[in-house]
Amino acid sequence: MKKIVTLIAIAIVGNSFAQKTLNLTFHPKASNQDLILDEIVQDITGAAMTISAFNYYISNIHVIYDGGQDLDLSDTVLLVQTDAGSFDLGQYDVPNIEQINFSVGVPEPINHLDITQYPTGHFLSFQTPSMHWGWTSGYKFLLVDGRADSNGDGEPTTLFQLHDLGDANFKNFQLPTVGTYMNERTQININCNLEQWLFGADVATLGVQHGSTGINAATMNNVNDRAVFESPASAGITELSKVGSLFFVNNGGNVEIKWNEVTGANSYNLIDLNGKVIVSNSTNENSGTYTSSNLSSGAYIFNITDVNGTTLNSIKVAN
């Protein structure tokens, strides 16, 4: 049964229709810790392990935005590595991101092509450690190399390797999420939880497992059955270099929002937590007031933007 982790987050969005650099970043985690190569982390049982390599392929990307529109990036294949998991995907206008769909692995039509056709540096070219198993089997969809604590002394000294491959282990995944909108960039952040991906594999006794069945197939099934990929709690929250000041007063359901010395103010909008625009107006006032006496109960975001749609200041409003 597919497990989809939903997220309620605040999307601070400007009133911009300009194209921005779309960035997709995978953050490696292990038991809620940042995963750093060769530093001790815990597996799902709490046992110590160190990871020397954690690589996987992502492909068939679709960004769903603004009421179900589909940005089709299905031709993209990415190699995610622990210390290289951030990718600029191009310039796009994707307001109000709702979901990202992607696959884990290399699509079958290109999984068995000649690796030598790709130039040095291409994600499908030769890698260190190798992500390719040969023409017949194709690429390794997941590679985890590390050491585990096999005697309970807290010292990970026992080598293990998990290399998953095979067309049958190509997995499709859907993740509801929101974008983080910055001046020139739109960011999609995804946490990748290694301990969830390794669920069912006792790394202390795993040894070397390279293949497409057994524990290799079981761990690839975790992509759909476990919380391997999640949106971080901070998704959609943009840290702003704020201009001027903003505050609001709620007097028995009468909401009054004031801004002061927001230099360059050109417009303001009020959005709910689903990204729906409730109010959108132009303004030429660096200091001003917006009032509402009929705002439904709930939480909102009030943004002030400049002529380019860049958010100058923003505040959370509750009614």
Image (cartoon, grey):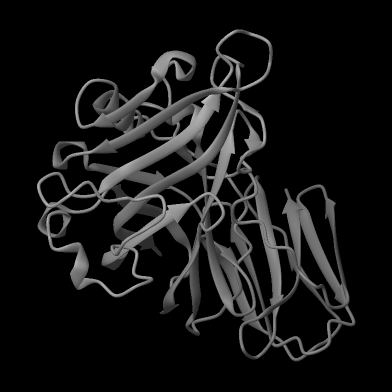
Task: Decide: is 271 above or below 31.
Answer: below
Residue 150 position within the rendered picture, expressed as x and y whole percent measured from the top left: 55, 12
Q: Residue at x 40, y 31 (%)?
A: 161
Is 33 situated left or right of 284 in this image?
A: left
Q: Residue at x 19, y 25 (%)?
A: 213
Is 22 situated left or right of 71 in this image?
A: right
User: From this viewpoint, is residue 27 visible?
Assistant: yes
Residue 240 position within the rendered picture, expressed as x and y whole percent measured from the top left: 76, 69
Task: Decide: is 310 above or below 165.
Answer: below
Q: Residue at x 18, y 54 (%)?
A: 107
Task: Decide: is 308 above or below 166.
Answer: below
Instruction: Compare residues 52 and 21 and report the one nearer the observer.
Output: 52
Task: Decide: is 267 above or below 174.
Answer: below
Residue 112 position within the rendered picture, expressed as x and y whole percent measured from the top left: 12, 55
Instruction: Compare residues 175 and 136 and report the one nearer the observer.
Output: 136
Q: Residue furthest top?
A: 151
Callout count: 0
Is 156 situated left or right of 62 in this image?
A: right
Is 152 situated left or right of 220 in this image?
A: right
Residue 69 position within the rendered picture, expressed as x and y whole percent measured from the top left: 31, 65
User: From this viewpoint, is residue 92 visible?
Assistant: no
Quadrant occupied by the N terminus: top left
Q: Could you say which quadrant of the image residue 164 lies in?
A: top left
